[in-house]
Amino acid sequence: MSQTISDVREVNFDGLVGPTHNYSGLAHGNVASMSHGGLVSNPREGALQGLGKMKSLMDAGYAQGVLPPQQRPDLGALRALGFSGSDGEVLARAAKEAPQILRAVCSASSMWTANAGTVTPSVDAPDGRVHFTPANLQSSFHRYLEPQTTGRVLAAIFENEGYFAHHPVLPATPAFSDEGAANHTRLCGAYGEPGVHLFVYGRQAFGGDGIEPKRYPARQTLEASQAVARQHGLTDAQTVFAQQHPEAIDGGVFHNDVIAVGNGPVLLYHAKAFRDEEGTLDELRAKMATPLIPVRVPEEAVSLEDAVGSYLFNSQLLSNPDGSMTLVVPGECQENEAVWRTIQDLLIAGANPINEVLVKDVKQSMRNGGGPACLRLRVALSDAERSAVTGRVLLNDGLYADLTAWVEKHYRDRLAVEDLADPQLAVETLTALDELTQLLKIGSVYPFQLG
């Protein structure tokens, strides 16, 4: 493990909301996604809301990056499933014979880049490089389609092998079901100090005591989390593996980042986050070099239902230069009286570093079950590592203006589920993505660009 690196900053890489953003209700166990299925979406508004959040955090002094969406509709996936003919014929046949499959290959779910992969900063890695493993997302078909393109995007942006290491996706089987950073939290002092990695899983594939959720599937296995830790060279002293509370998963907490969020030494969590709450905290305390600051929200203050409905814990927790922290919450938190009171009384006024709350409107994302924390992949980088990033992906005023103009030019302001069969939508999307890769200067990363 490396020594402390003083110039490390955390960069939040947000996923751009894609041109086919729609409400198909595909995510089983995601209450918001299922309950909003069939609504008409506004892709343009969704993308602009996401960019607006990125810009406001950049303006507040936080380092911000951007990741491109996936190629959708995924016509290659439809052809692999036996649909043939021209693009229009493939779409028409899928719409008629297998509408759920068509909806899946049009999903804009890659906007939630917390699921893109797991990242270990160089200060924790034995070889002194930043390590990436794309998540296999095998538990749902519409997300299983993402990892190959995600891997190419990450490899294009973090290209310099002297600074960055990329690992293969885990086997896409139920035993190694991996949902990425949504079930992983790094706790530390300053970002450049050695940290401890908290991996949260829902079930064990091999062995275990059989205590698992009954209503909804557990999307992360212990075996997957352990495999990622091995890939990145993390030791027992650097890792804690904790089981998510089965009742939380059955209540709609499909990822740990819907029930807990950590930053620096602070772990903000709901009482129902972990099956063994005390054991998890004790192990973190034993392994962390900096004292853990647990911030527990009891059920009496915020019910599990309110936690899921408001996405209080799917908020971004960000460090400020003075040692304080800012909590970035979705607007739904302000609309829930119990949640808003808890934010004011327990968090802002509590004995912890959180002293500011920022409310962001990300309703287009929230209706599909993704809050501010879902929309970003956290990558801690030193100055040298930031300089080694390829392409034009670190947000500044010029890039923000160009991306906003790109969205205004290419995105529809209304998309119903039945519009997904429109061959013109596919043409519009490929045209937009081809222009985007040039704008971001990341080269050819999409299947249609690779032939």
Image (spheres, rainbow, N blue to C red):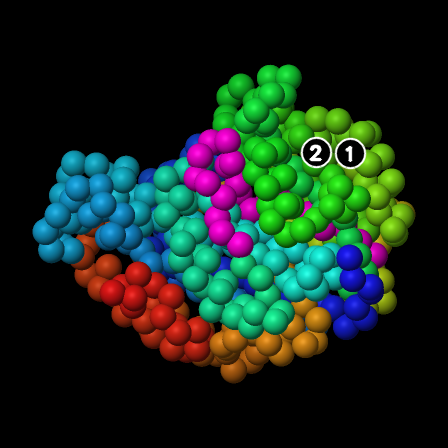
Q: Relative to 426, is 83 above or below? A: above
Given residues 286 and 268, the one toward you in this image is 286
Tell me which amino acid carries mark 2: Ala
The residue positioned 19% from the left and 61% from the top of the image is 424
Quadrant location of the C terminus? bottom left
Local packing at callout 1 (Cα closer than 10 Å; few below 14, some 14-19, many 20+) is some
Residue 110 placed where, x, y %?
Answer: 44, 53
- Which type of secondary structure does the marked residue at label 2 adopt? strand
173 in the magenta segment: yes
Location of residue 340 by image quarter: top right
Q: CA distance from mark 2 to mark 1?
A: 6 Å
Q: Picture coordinates of residue 270 (x, y %)?
A: 72, 35
> Dots 2 and 1: beta carbons under 8 Å?
yes
Assess disc 2: are there few (<14), some (14-19) or many (≥20) residues with their C-alpha within 10 Å of its C-alpha.
many
Task: Using the rendered image of the protein, determine whether residue 92 is visible from the camera's viewpoint.
Answer: no
Determine if the magenta segment contains residue 122: no
Question: Residue 54: percent from the left, percent from the top?
Answer: 57, 66
Picture quarter containing residue 283? top right
The answer to which of marks 2 and 1 sits earlier in the sequence is 2
Point 39% across, 62% down: residue: 44
Residue 280's mark?
1
Q: Is residue 284 visible?
A: yes
The residue indicated by pointer 2 is 242
User: Is 73 left, or right, of 62 in this rendering?
Assistant: left
Q: Residue flagged by tag 1: what amino acid is it?
A: Thr
How many labels were placed on the picture?
2
Q: Position of residue 8 (x, y in %)?
A: 74, 68
